[in-house]
Image: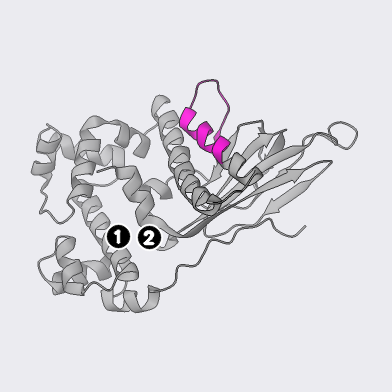
Amino acid sequence: MDVLSDVITSFRAGRPFANREDRAGVWHIPFASFAGAGFHIVLSGSCRLLTPDGSQRTLSVGDVVLTPHGAQHALENLGHADAEADSPTSLLCGAYQLDQTHLHPLLATLPDVIHLRVRFGRHPALHSAVSLLGTELRNPQQGSVSALSTLLDLLLIYMLRAWLEDESERGAPGWSAALADPVISAALSAMHENPAHAWTVEELGKEANLSRAAFARRFTTLVGEPPLTYLTWWRLSIAARLLKESGTSLESIARSVGYGSQYAFANAFKRVHGTSPGRYRRTHTGDQQPTQWHPSPG
C-alpha cells in the first residue's frame, strides 16, 4: 500500500482549483487564510512571497510554493516602479480543499510554507507536471477539464513527495524519515493495507524484522506516537470517511476497520472524534463543497 497516496485520498475534499495570473508593473496580491492547501508556481518572471510574520522569500522561474494549511500570505513584484515595473510575471495559482477536522499527522506537521527551489535535475516529475499544467491553462482544448483535474492531483503528490525527499536528505526527523526508513515504512504499509487485522506490536515488529521493543522505540521516535495508537487513529479516520461518503451500515464499517462489535466501535470512535458514529454521519454527510480560493480584495 502506498501510504502517501492513501493519506492524500483520505483527506481530500471538494474539487481542486487552479488559474493563471499574469501580472506586469508594480503589483501586490493578498491571499486570505482558508481551510485547505494553496500553491503557487512561477512560470515566468519573478516575485516575492510575504508572510504575516514579516518574512520574505524571492521566487524565481520554476519555483513552487505550497501552503499546506492555507495560511495567509501575499505575492508581489520585485523592486519598485523605477526598477522592475516592466518585468511581466506569470503565475500558476491553485488550491486543494482538505478535511481539517481530523488531519493526518503527516499533513498536520507540515510547515506553513514549503518552498521548493529550482535546481537543475531536481524533482523532474514535479517540473513536468508544472509544464503540462501551464500548457493546458494557456491553450485549453477538448478534454482540458479532465486533464486539469488529473494534473492537479498529480501536482499535489509531486509537491509532497519533493518536500519529503528534501527533508529526508537533510536528515530531518518525523514523517519524511519514517517513510524513507524501510523498517517503519514496511510496518506503516502493512497497517494501511489491512487496517482490520488484529495487529500486535510484536507482529508489526516481525514485518519490520525487529524485536517488539526495538520496533516500538523506532516507530514512536519517527512517527511521533506508538504503533497501536497510530493504528487506532488511522482505523477511525477511515471510518469517518466511510460515514461521510457512503451509506455503508455501522456494523460493516466497524468490521472493515477491525472492530468486532458496533459497541466497541462506537466507544472508540467517540473517544477520537468526540461524537457517536451516527451523529457524525448526520452532521457531516454532504458537507464537502468545491474548493473556492481566490486573491483577497485589494
The crowd level at tag 1 (other Cα within 10 Å; few <14, some 14-19, many 20+) is many
SS at mark 2 in the image: helix
Q: Which mark is residue 278?
A: none
Disc 1 to disc 2, how far (Cα)? 7 Å
Residue in front for this viewpoint, 22 or 139:
139
Picture coordinates of residue 207, whole percent (x, y): 12, 37
Q: Which mark is residue 102?
A: 2
Q: How many marks?
A: 2
Q: Determine whether, in the image, residue 244 is placed left or right of residue 89.
A: left
Q: Determine whether, in the image, residue 120 is placed left or right of residue 5.
A: right
Residue in front for this viewpoint, 112 or 180:
180
SS at mark 1 in the image: helix
The amino acid pointed to by label 2 is His
The picture quadrant where one finds residue 157 is top left
Q: Determine whether, in the image, residue 282 is placed left or right of residue 262.
A: right
Asked if residue 12 lies in the magenta stretch, the reply is: no
Can residue 174 be seen?
Answer: no
Picture coordinates of residue 105, whole percent (x, y): 36, 49
Q: Determine whether, in the image, residue 84 is placed left or right of residue 31.
A: right
The quadrant in which the N terminus is found is top left
In the image as oriented, which residue stretches furthest toward the top?
120
The quadrant in which the C terminus is found is bottom right
| Badge 1 vs badge 2, beta-carbon distance below 8 Å | yes
Residue range (magenta): 113-132
Residue in front for this viewpoint, 108 or 46:
46
Picture coordinates of residue 220, whole percent (x, y): 25, 41
Can residue 286 be seen?
Answer: yes
Q: Which mark is residue 237?
A: 1
Residue in front for this viewpoint, 285 or 101:
285
Q: Who comes first in sequence, dot 1 or dot 2? A: 2
